[in-house]
Image (cartoon, helix red, strand yellow):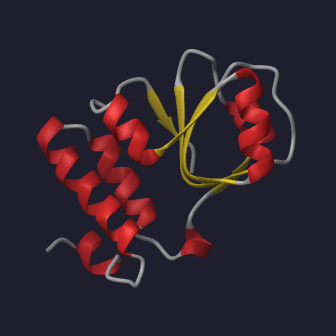
Amino acid sequence: MTNIQKRIKRKNNVLQHLVETLLSHSEEKEAPVWETVATYLSRPTRLRPEKNIRELDKEGNEDEILLVPGKVLGVGRTKKSLTVVAYKFSKTAKKHLEKNGKTMTIQEALEKHSEGKNMRILA
């Protein structure tokens, strides 16, 4: 059992399963991005990153996938067509991002982009 798996031993079985899946997928596909995401998700909730749409608009490009290993909040607007992956989205953030771009959960991104190519972690 790795240090990450020891830290995630909590009551949230869904999160625990996601972290274990990310770690095994990271080894199988040799994609270190998933191990980094698992590390962020194994932290306490208050230490996970939160990003506003305004920050995503400033930091992101349309040709890359922005990965937030925490929560995306609905403050700000974007006119860019962004693809954003996150553990959680607020209702307003999801609504505003889907007007021009796409949103995905980490599990969906793991299935669609298993190699972790062209992803940038915003933490």
Q: Quadrant of residue 6?
A: bottom left
Whether residue 97 appears in this view of the structure is: yes
**123 sits left or right of 73 in the view:** left
**78 sits left or right of 120 in the view:** right
Front-most of residues 42 and 105: 105
In the rendered image, residue 62, in percent from the top left (x then y), is placed at 63, 17
Q: Quadrant of the N terminus?
A: bottom left
Q: Quadrant of residue 50?
A: bottom right
- The residue at 44%/61% (across/down) is 40
- The residue at 34%/76% (across/down) is 8
- The residue at 74%/21% (across/down) is 100
In the rendered image, residue 30, in percent from the top left (x then y), is placed at 17, 37
In the rendered image, residue 18, in percent from the top left (x then y), is placed at 34, 59
Q: Quadrant of residue 114?
A: top left
Question: Is 65 above or below relative to 3?
Answer: above
Disc tally is: 0
Question: Is 116 above or below relative to 2?
Answer: above
**73 sits left or right of 67 in the view:** right
- The residue at 30%/65% (across/down) is 17
In the rendered image, residue 57, in percent from the top left (x then y), is placed at 75, 30
Whether residue 116 appears in this view of the structure is: no
Q: Residue furthest right?
A: 76
Question: Is 82 above or below relative to 8?
Answer: above
Front-most of residues 85 and 95: 95
